[in-house]
């Protein structure tokens, strides 16, 4: 039941993000969408992912987006308002994708997949949370992508700082 | 506690995905386009986590969604730096105005 509450909240605020013309309202409704997706992660037994969602998206990406809005629009001359274009074509394309995806999902007989049949229903087993097993896996099986991710973050940090600086003044 | 049906989660993520597509197509401010991309990332992550529920020992879906979040954070940082540079150069962050100014 809680899942449907979060799902409705996520869909409604994502729709409001598209319907509103004020950029700051769009940012704050994206906040509600990200928070409800984090709640759905908790309901799907992914506690670590939910906390990461809160810290990375809500604490990092969303603040970056709000900074981007404030730095890239002049509030006094109404450029904080963004108009919608391609309304008909956008709605047509998005509706077509939605109908296609829904048709596929509803007709795919996902429950009959063999590896879902054999999967245990006792999701967490003996452990109380997924944090310990995720930590062990990051340091053993997934250590190469883990280090690559740290390298990627370093490159992105340096690149973003380099791009954002005013090159003429340096 | 009863299990959430897998189809409902997949349908939710399909709706979020198409809303992200709609945001990318119909909005012309660069930051809102980035918001649409974040929405699509979230839809993909939701699918990964939903299927990871049936993989309790390996948790591959959850780990993959973790790396998706890392890439999304890096992408957002670089893209916003690019948006700021474009705004400094063209004095606008509207994509149509940037294109028309470039063609002038």
Image (cartoon, grey):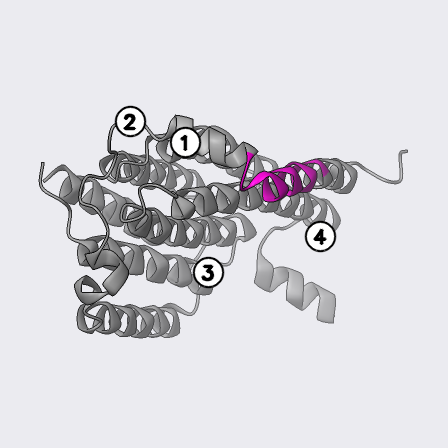
- Image position, residue A72 (x, y; %): 60, 42
Of residues A67 and B39, which is closer to you in this image?
A: B39
Whether label 4 touches label 3, CB < 8 Å: no
Q: Are marks 2 and 1 in contact (CB under 8 Å)?
A: yes
Residue topped by disc 4:
B90
| Above or below, comparing residue B102 to residue B71 in the picture | below
What secondary structure is found at the residue carrying circle 3? helix
Query: What is the chain letter for disc 4?
Result: B
Question: In the rendered structure, does residue A148 fall within the stretch colored magenta?
Answer: yes
- Mark 4 Cα-neighbour bin, 10 Å: few <14, some 14–19, many ≥20: few
Q: Are marks 3 and 2 in contact (CB under 8 Å)?
A: no
Q: Which quadrant is the C terminus of chain A positioned in? A: top right
Q: Is residue B29 left or right of residue B8?
A: right
**Disc 1 to disc 4, how far (Cα)?**
49 Å
Q: Are marks 3 and 1 on the same chain?
A: no
**Disc 3 sits on a residue from what chain?**
B
Q: Which residues are magenta?
A: A140-154
**CA–CA distance between discs 2 and 1?**
9 Å
Q: Secondary structure at mark 1?
A: helix
Instruction: Return the residue at label 1.
Output: A133
Q: Which residue is mark 2?
A: A127
Identify the residue at image location x=62%, y=61%: B97
């Amino acid at each position: 039941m809680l899942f449907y509450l979060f799902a409705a909240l996520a869909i409604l605020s994502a729709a409001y993000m598209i319907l509103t013309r004020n950029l700051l309202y769009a940012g704050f409704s994206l906040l509600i969408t990200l928070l409800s997706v984090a709640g759905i992660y908790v309901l799907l037994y992914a506690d670590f992912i939910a906390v990461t969602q809160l810290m990375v998206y809500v604490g990092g990406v969303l603040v970056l987006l709000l900074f981007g809005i404030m730095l890239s629009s002049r509030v006094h001359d109404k450029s904080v308002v963004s108009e919608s274009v391609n309304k008909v074509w956008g709605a047509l394309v998005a509706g077509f994708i939605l109908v296609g995806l829904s048709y596929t999902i509803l007709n795919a007989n996902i429950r009959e997949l063999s590896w879902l049949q054999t999967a245990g229903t006792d999701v967490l087993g003996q452990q109380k949370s997924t944090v310990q097993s995720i930590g062990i896996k990051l340091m053993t099986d997934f250590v190469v992508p883990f280090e690559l991710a740290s390298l990627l973050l370093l490159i992105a940090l340096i690149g973003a700082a380099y791009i954002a600086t005013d090159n003429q003044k340096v | 506690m009863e299990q959430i049906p897998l189809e409902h989660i997949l349908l939710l993520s399909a709706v979020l995905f198409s809303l992200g597509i709609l945001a990318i197509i119909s909005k012309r401010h660069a930051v809102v386009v980035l918001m649409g991309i974040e929405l699509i990332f979230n839809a993909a992550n939701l699918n990964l986590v939903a299927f990871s529920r049936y993989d309790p020992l390996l948790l591959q879906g959850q780990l993959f969604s973790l790396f998706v979040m890392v890439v999304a954070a890096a992408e957002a940082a670089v893209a916003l730096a690019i948006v700021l540079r474009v705004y400094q150069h063209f004095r606008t962050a509207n994509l149509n105005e940037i294109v028309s100014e470039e063609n002038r």
